[in-house]
Image: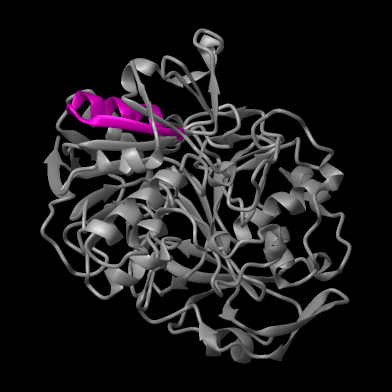
Amino acid sequence: MAQFITAAQAAELIPDNATVGIAGMGLSGWAEEIACAIRDRFAATGHPCNLNLKQGSAIGDWGNGNNYIGWDRTKRDEPDRAHGNRGVTRLGEAGPGLVTKWTSAHIGSAFTLNKIAAEKGLEVHCLPQGVTINLWREIAAGRPGLITKVGLGTFVDPRVEGGSMNGLDTEDVVRLVEFNGEEYLFYPSFKCDVALLRGTIADENGNISFDHESVMNEGFDVATAVKNCGGIVIVQVEYLAKKETLNPKDVKIPGKLVDYVVQAKDPMSCWQAEGDYWQPSFSGHIRIPLDSIEPLPFDERKVICRRCAMELKKGDLVNLGVGIPADMAKVVAEEGFIEDVTMSTESGMVGGVPSALPSFGSAYNPEAIITASDMFDLIDGGGLDMTCLGIGEIDGDGNNNVSRMGSRLTGPGGFIDISAATPKVIFAGTLMGKAKYKIGDGKIEIVQEGTIRKFVDKVGQITFAGQYAPEGQEVLYITERAVFKLIDHKMTLIEIAPGIDLEKDVLANLGFRPEISPDLKLMDSEIFNETWGGLGKYFEKK
């Protein structure tokens, strides 16, 4: 039976050199109070040290000048809760030595550990999110690892970078293998000593409910893997309940898998998502009127979202990535067609309106919330109809880099898994960064050219490998000025925006010379008007 202890007592249980598994997305599933206690113990005693941290999704929040649009800093009134200070970044706040190895799909929001990694103070690998999450099930079942084509040709491929983000390689995290005459990547299992998890409610027997969580994360898989490795499972919760009062279907981690439970002293260490302590429509407790969701402002981002929405078909199951892609949901809702398609995110949200930053991964009014593990099975098997993902850097081979921009280490999140298996892939973003525009009257004009070139000669890291795009996959690159398509593995310009000069505004800002379609068209001028109302005609055409 689980023991009920304090966060400080939990920190004492973590041995030096332990491999620690965590689960969650954003702040959902993150044991903030226990992590702070681990940090404080290390600062005071130097222990635990040399931890090997294993995580799937991005866990933390954003801030500290990271260009959050619409973030309300007045939501917190204590310096320790300042935006950007919560999440995995806690484990780097006492300096190097607490964590010396780190494997994750996304490390961008753990600022302190990220800085240590960039300065080569710890070894860091980034692997595809679905691979990382589903590898826990392989470990739990005692299998040797996960074999998949996900990651071939990308920086994860050992022929490229082997998933290393800073060149420090002492751990073998991926291998190239041949099976039935085809190339695959093999991600080996590993032994894990500690699971550090969070739920909403624990009963007296240690059964864990995720009642208020916005994401049904891989906590059960991590707990099972750790228990079957002979390790310990520690779970932070907000509430305690009398035994046998939880609905059995609500128990997501059975008490037999839980060794220790910490009831958080501060409820503010149990945020549902980065931007919301408690948004009941995220967890299915209420459904909010969709007209209460604030529409996007009319700018180049909205234009891009509108052009992406034109690629939808009624009945599509669509995945939306972080950034501009997530905002497409608001355009579809504003146009009145949110019930004609099913939006989803890799966190397990199905239906509703996916939230953009700062609560990406959650959704308003979801129809279903499945585990991230199950969602990636759906994704990897080709179950999506379309995905819309972001643009970091694009080159002439159609490669897209969103994982490492110069010295800034981020990781791919679910980008590699999703783009590898989805039949229609849209990459969405501005053609130049920091440009200023005048938009209206059916056209777009550049007022001040941008200073950041996104379409480059060669990407700094390959997160999507254009030359590995599977046969029959449709790949589009949609910007506010032009639309490109990967045709026979060549970047081909197929549309240009009204008001844009082909040579001066597009070709001169590319680091490569694309093919130009003989049927080059103008983008629909109506999406460059403040009021659109034209999405329906594209649904009707299909």
Where does the C terminus fall, quadrant-wise? top right
Q: With 120 as the anchor, is 220 left or right in this view?
A: right
Front residue of this view, candidates 346 and 80: 80
Residue 156: x and y, percent?
26, 57
381 horizontally vs 174: left or right: right
Q: Is residue 104 left or right of residue 46?
A: right
- From what the image shows, is residue 210 above or below residue 451? above
Residue visible at 73% across and 66% down in the picture: 303
Residue sitting at x 55%, y 40%: 385
Quadrant occupied by the N terminus: top left
**Quarter location, residue 133:** top left
Q: Looking at the image, which residue is at 68% across and 54% down?
A: 328
Relative height, residue 526 to residue 134 (above, below): below
The spot of residue 131 in percent (x, y) is 32, 42
Q: Is residue 428 above or below residue 339?
A: below
Q: Magenta segment: does it hold 219?
A: yes
Magenta part of the chain:
217-236
Give residue 116's position: percent from left, percent from top. Answer: 29, 70
> Residue 126: x percent and y percent?
30, 56
Q: Which of the 4 image quadrants contains residue 164?
A: bottom left
Task: Between residue 165 and residue 224, name the one nearer to us.
Answer: 224
Q: Is residue 222 visible?
A: no
Which residue is nearer to you in this view: 497 or 190?
190
Asked if the magenta segment contains residue 444, the reply would be: no
